[in-house]
Image (tube, rainbow, N blue to C red):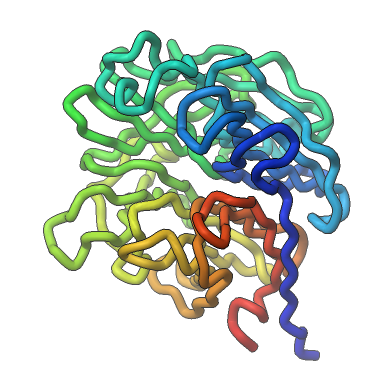
Amino acid sequence: MKTTPEFTQTDVYVGNTEGYHTFRIPSLVVTASGTVLAFCEGRRNDRDDSGDIDLLLRRSEDGGQTWSPIQVVWNDPGNTCGNPCPVVDRYTGSVWLLMTHNLGQDLAPELHRGTAIGTRTVWVSQSKDDGRSWSKPVDITENTKKSSWTWYATGPGAGIQIDSGRLLIPCDHLLSTGQAFSHVVYSDDHGETWAIGGIVPDDQLNECEVVDLGDGKVLLNMRNHGQGEKSSWKRTRATSISKDGGMSWSSTSHDGTLVEPICQGSLRRVIESGKNRFLFSNPASKSTRENMTIRLSSDKCESWSHSRLLNSGWSGYSCLAQLSEGLIGCLYERGDHTPYERVTLARFNFEWVRGS
């Protein structure tokens, strides 16, 4: 029997409420027991990337239909706690949340150049109870950031666990020269310790998402700040392949179908009737953060057979997750006048993506 297309959406965070000016940088995962966790940054005073920023969470135990009150996972008054990138360990049930921190007075350009008073540091927290409570954040900068790196970002988006049990977190960093690189950090002991994995050899890359292709290879899909060797590659997503669990990466290729205005995007492997499918979301425009679009691949991201416009207006960052069998969630930024007025969860099935 043919399944009917399903689509609903609900605002999870709305700007100028709950004591926050703006909510940004959405992240979405589903725990081993099925609880949906929707993270974001709560920017108290303005929309800027620096300043007084808290890391927030709302939980849903009914597949994203209703939500708990806002929970502050990490708050360092006056300073910046952000870039949520959680990963679920399917063997232990723990959720590990990697994050970054900097002094609120340090502006992003200063952090990029390495001239700020402080620097970006890397932290991790653990939940053993489906996100109800979190351990005190632990500073793991020494093992996950090289001294020559200035700016650093975990995710944003979500990490993955590959078949070996390794946890992989997509990250990016800058050198004081202005060169930008994507890399991963990993854990082989279920989150107890973390280390730097492979670094993509080409520069002018930035925020990225990692996906297990299911054939022993891992793919990194990256925000592209450069032009590449061909002018046609400008404003298209860059990709790189690892054959050793993220310890090394190929030179970049470019996916001409995945156009972007230079913005974060989300990539996730999902299951449909026992088969691997791959979904990608981003503002599908070469000029403006608008036209949030969902794309579907059945051939390990080699091509994108179906595309569906999710939001034709202002749209920013996003994060995909499989909520249940046949139902997908996309937590994304949108607004009427800017892309950053609310964070919304769209819930849809494969039939909606295919337009069938």
Seen in the image, is 83 located left or right of residue 239? right
Residue drawn at the location 27% of the way across and 46% of the way down: 250
| Left/right of residue 123 with respect to residue 237 in the rendered view | right
Q: Where is residue 90 in the image (x, y as percent from the top left)?
A: 71, 40
Decide which of 145, 57 is in the foreground and name it: 57
Q: In which quarter of the image is the N terminus?
A: bottom right
Residue drawn at (59%, 55%) of the image: 332
State whether residue 94 appears in this view.
yes
> Is 326 placed left or right of 148 in the picture?
right
Q: Against 292, is 14 above or below?
A: above
Which residue is nearer to you in this view: 216 or 298? 298
What number of labels is visible?
Answer: 0
Q: Residue at x 40, y 48 (%)?
A: 220
Quadrant where the image shows the C terminus: bottom right
Residue 16 against residue 78 in the figure, above or below: below
Measuring from the top left, give residue 248's x and y in whole percent: 32, 37
- Visible in this render: residue 166? no
Residue 98 image offset from top left, x and y in percent: 57, 28
State left or right for residue 23 relative to residue 201: right
Is 202 placed above or below 344 here? Answer: above
The foreground one among 184 and 52 is: 52
Q: Is residue 38 above or below residue 310?
A: above
The image position of residue 126, as x and y in percent, is 70, 24
The structure residue drawn at horizontal position 39% and vertical position 52%, both measured from the top left corner, is 263
In terms of image quadrants, where is residue 109? top left
